[in-house]
Image: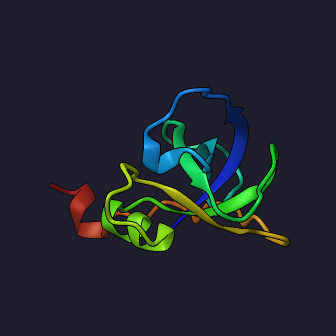
Amino acid sequence: MILARVTGVVVAPQKNVELECQRLLVVHPIGLDGGFVGSSFLAVDRVDAGEGDHVLVNREGSGARLALGNDKTPVQAVVVAVVDRWDPQPAPPPLREPPHAAQA
């Protein structure tokens, strides 16, 4: 599962027949500190998420198709939950090098 934020909606008048009744969202992964990480991607919306919502995304092809109940759907990512409450945490401090590593 990936924590992400919905940054847009895709309007596509022509889609693959398996996606005809599916809504497509642009989502951008976020880290535990709330900041964007990585690149945005498309995901099928199964939970009526809206722009600005924090969501959980299943981004594993076969699991995404399983969530849709159709193994013929050409999809890699599905929004499976809207996150109602989430407390961003600061990033953990970097690991210190062992004392003997600095002498090498």
Where is residue 74? Give x, y as percent.
Answer: 36, 49
Q: In the drawing, does residue 6 fall left or right of residue 1?
A: right
Where is residue 79? Give x, y as percent.
Answer: 60, 60
The residue lying at 27 percent from left, 56 percent from top is 102
Nearest the camera: 92 or 80? 80
The residue lying at 40 percent from left, 51 percent from top is 75
Where is residue 37? Give x, y as percent.
Answer: 55, 44
Colouring scheme, one of rainbow, by chain, secondary structure, one colour: rainbow
Above or below for 16 versus 80: above
Where is residue 1? Give x, y as percent.
Answer: 50, 69
Nearest the camera: 24 or 1? 24
- Quarter of the picture containing the C terminus is bottom left
Q: Residue furthest left?
A: 104
Q: In the drawing, does residue 95 fall left or right of residue 25?
A: left
Q: In the drawing, does residue 64 fall left or right of residue 83?
A: left
Residue 55, image quadrant? bottom right
The residue lying at 49 percent from left, 40 percent from top is 38
Nearest the camera: 82 or 30? 82
The residue lying at 45 percent from left, 72 percent from top is 69
Above or below for 104 versus 26: below
